Amino acid sequence: MKVVQICTNYKGGAGKAAFRLHNALLKNGVDSVFISLGKVPLIDIKGNKSILINTSTSLFRRVVHRIKKKLKLEHRFILELRSINPNLECLLTSLPFSKIKLHIIKEIKNADIVNIHGVTHILDYKFFFNKIKAPIVWTLHDINPIAGLFHLRTDEENNKIVANSLNEKVIDYKKSIYNNIKNGAIITPSNWLYKESIKRNMFKWFFYYEIANSIPSSYFKTKDRNVLRERHNIASNIITLLFVSSDLKDKNKGFDLLLEALECIKKDNIQLLIVGDGDVSVFNKYQILNFGYISKDEEMINIFNMADIFILPSRDENLPNVLLESLACGTPVVSFNIGGMPQYIKIGINGEIASEMTGESLGEAISLSIKNKNNYSRELIKDFACSNFNENKQATEYIKIYNQLSDKV
């Protein structure tokens, strides 16, 4: 069985999860190929290079595009989005159009199963689904495939006045395309997104499944935390709180709520471990250890193991990789009651859930986790993660769905 995994970017959360699925499938004998944008191909566990999407266009096509834009001959959705864009307050919007012709990629044309992930800006819905006849599996990493313009629920809600008319048009447009796909499946990593997908009912002919993302086996290896902490001169009496965000300016990741929470914690022996791009000067009044942007799993594994508690203060999430990674390393997590968090954070066992989405409530949850620090069993937390997020379990469940769809062809 030939399967392709298609994702916009291999650096983001969706790309990382998709590439991990690709490797898990390879380990279980599936002929999987990973396709995305990027400058340098990824190397999978078999030593194969990922396929990079060619985004170059001819001079003629570029000239035509400029003329269309100047004369306002583009699709009406593009024109309408451009007109309201200055008034939108959101992380990201996208439309179901692209100039990229994915269907001409040989591996996609010859695939028995096409597994789509986050495909913002690379997938022209109408053209692609009209050309591709293989069964479609769509692994959701946010709400966009089952929504209109937006990728986050909060953005959808916060921009209703400005964008509702266009948003509803885009939803209807997507539905009209989905209705022509007769053999497919939606897979969600969390129960929250599974229920949301069924409620929104965008896919008439698709089956719905819930399969958690997986974590590479390297995350489950036991590390000597004392040695790791000593390398960074972290004293034994210091309580280390970890915060991770690829972009520290991203308001959705909740760094402002973390700042408010820290004001509520009456402890002098706290050190913040910070991972991500951006200005960390807002944390200067606290003792911090800034690692910057980290791309290598081994480095992240060490940091998760150094941390006593991982703080995940996002306002809106599905099931972020960092949650799974933290639990795989045995590190308890403090977060809000959103997305897949309450499904996998068991209060008092592997973390705490803030009762409200406020800095004060988050501070109370962090304080409780500090109080319970010695009661959490890192080994039990790792065991829980291993049973829920292991590669073989994920691959086996995906293969079963692939086979069911193939049998219908």
Image (cartoon, grey):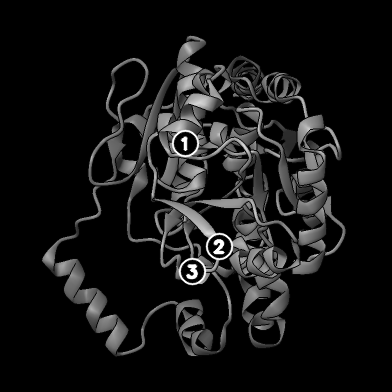
The kind of residue on which mark 3 rests is: Lys
- Which residue bears the numbered disc 1? 300
Q: Are marks 3 and 2 in contact (CB under 8 Å)?
A: no
Label placed on residue 249: 3
Q: Is residue 215 visible?
A: yes
| Residue at the image position 57 percent from the left and 17 percent from the top | 222
Residue 40 percent across, percent down from the top left: 23, 40
Q: Which mark is residue 286?
A: 2
Q: Is residue 332 left or right of residue 18?
A: right
Q: Is residue 282 left or right of residue 161?
A: left
Q: Residue at x 70, y 69 (%)?
A: 263
Q: Position of residue 38 (x, y in %)?
A: 29, 46
Identify the amino acid type marked 1.
Met
Say whether marks 1 and 2 touch (CB < 8 Å).
Answer: no
Q: Quadrant of residue 62?
A: bottom left
- Residue 233 in the image, given as x and y percentages of width and height: 45, 39
The amino acid type of the residue labelled 2 equals Tyr
At 44% from the left edge and 77% from the top edge, which residue is drawn? 75
